[in-house]
Amino acid sequence: MLIDEKGIRSDGRKWNELRPIKMEVGVLKNADGSCYIEFGKNKIMVAVYGPKEVHPRHMALSDRSLLRCRYHMSPFSTTTRKNPAPSRREIEISKVLREALEPSLILEDYPRTAIDVFVEILQSDGGSRCAGITAASVALADAGINMRDLVSAVAVGKVDGKIVLDLNDVEDKEGEADMPVAIMPNLNRVTLFQFEGILTREEFEKAYELALKSVKKIYKIQREALYEKYFEGEVKVE
Amino acid sequence: MVKRKYVVPGDLIVEGDLRASTNTFKIGNRIYSLRVGLAEIGNGSVRVIPLSGTYIPRVGDVVIGEVIDISAFAWQLDINSCFYGYLTAQSVFGRGYSPSKYNLSNKFKIGDLLLAKIQSFDRTRDPMLSISGPGLGPIERGVVIKVNAMKVPRLIGKKGSMIRLIESATKCKVILGQNGVIVVSGEPDGVSKAIEIIRLVESKAHLAELNRMVKELIDSWGVRDADR
């Protein structure tokens, strides 16, 4: 049983509750932009380098910047040691991450350059791709790359027959459905939409609405993190 | 009247019939920010002064570059950017230049610092530099420090007020490149003071009371020196 009779989940949350989120911007001195995020038990460090010259040179694109993403789980991020070599899953998430961030960036402003994004999972507990996108977007803003909007992401799913928000590791593995969604909150555009499992049409609509609503809360935390670094929290975030 | 506002990417700055200037974009008549920074609304247009980012060359900028490579026709300079700057031998020796007559490394060696102007740059070509102009050319001595290029305008101040303040307070010569490379020369004590002020300006660039803070720092030295 992942949800008890009172509707409380395995980690004590209600169905529509997020895990506690903590973000810090500009934690790495040598990177052009960086962000550290704690998303429940997930601990993720994101570093952005660029725009910079492209190596190898032949990869450079003449009309826009080359966005490269690396999603990587540290060997100590899981309960049993994870082989540090990039797995099939990590290569796929790297691609998915890149495609989720790309629409928010104006890469045409930096032709013949590269932008590298490194997402390092230091501790994982389900939903790390969403937390990674959220942090990577803030790190890109910190690096001063022209972007249309921040990207905020969250997963919704179905556990024990109920729609739940922000699945943790157990719920992700044992649950009936998992749906990570990334959104540009101001422009109201979806940049990532993945779905695994089975939902009825009504359940899907409920889950999607829940994701749209919750992403706004994450967006607020992203803004606060940027305000904290750049304006010393001087001004209240609306 | 210019209205200022703190913004992050994607923030709606203002709605209305205004021109979207630097670091902003427009959808319908809504103007959004592209960067983290200070939005300025006024005079029929909206712009954002960014607070982060690397240096992107612009034609007319005066930059400090370090010679990193020499070919038969040009020096390649690291200008603290994602592009290298090229200073052609022709622009230095004149039109009569031929690789058989001159040796480029006799003029500038690898590691030399040059104050140069960006003569041409667009999205298809790397920046071309020029050292013909008043004050341009090799920099002989000084301590090199790097700051975020986005903070350079605050370091210059209104009509160069900040840089003049630093120079007069520390009795140092400060050469400032638009790319965030700075060369400070003078007495060792003055140089370390100048670097301290520059670091203060860099960390507090977005604050309105920056001038007061710098003056306070300078005044505190006055007291310290008088005690001695």
Image (cartoon, coloured by chain):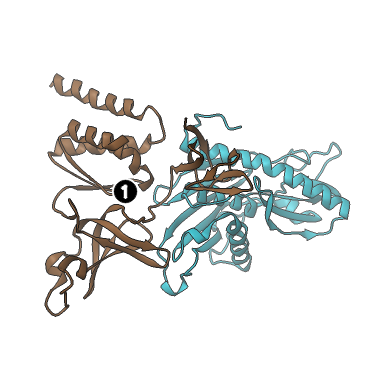
Chain colours: A cyan, B brown
Residue B206 falls in which quadrant of the image?
A: top left
**Residue plotted at (62% across, 58% down):** A100
Q: Is residue B181 left or right of residue B209?
A: left
Identify the subunit bearing mark 1.
Answer: B
Residue assigned mark 1 = B180
Name the image quarter holding the C terminus of chain A.
top right
Up the image or down, B23 lies above or below B206; here it is below
SS at badge 1: loop
Up the image or down, B78 lies above or below B142; here it is below
Up the image or down, A100 lies above or below B27; here it is below
Residue A149 in view here: no
Which sits in the foreground, A173 or A15?
A: A15
Q: What residue type is labelled 1?
A: Gly
Q: Is residue B215 left or right of residue A144?
A: left
Image coordinates for residue A71, horizontal then vertical, percent: 56, 60
**Residue plotted at (77% across, 42% down):** A9
Residue B12 falls in which quadrant of the image?
A: top right
Image coordinates for residue A119, horizontal then vertical, percent: 54, 55
**Residue plotted at (15% across, 69% down):** B105
Up the image or down, B126 lies above or below B29; here it is below
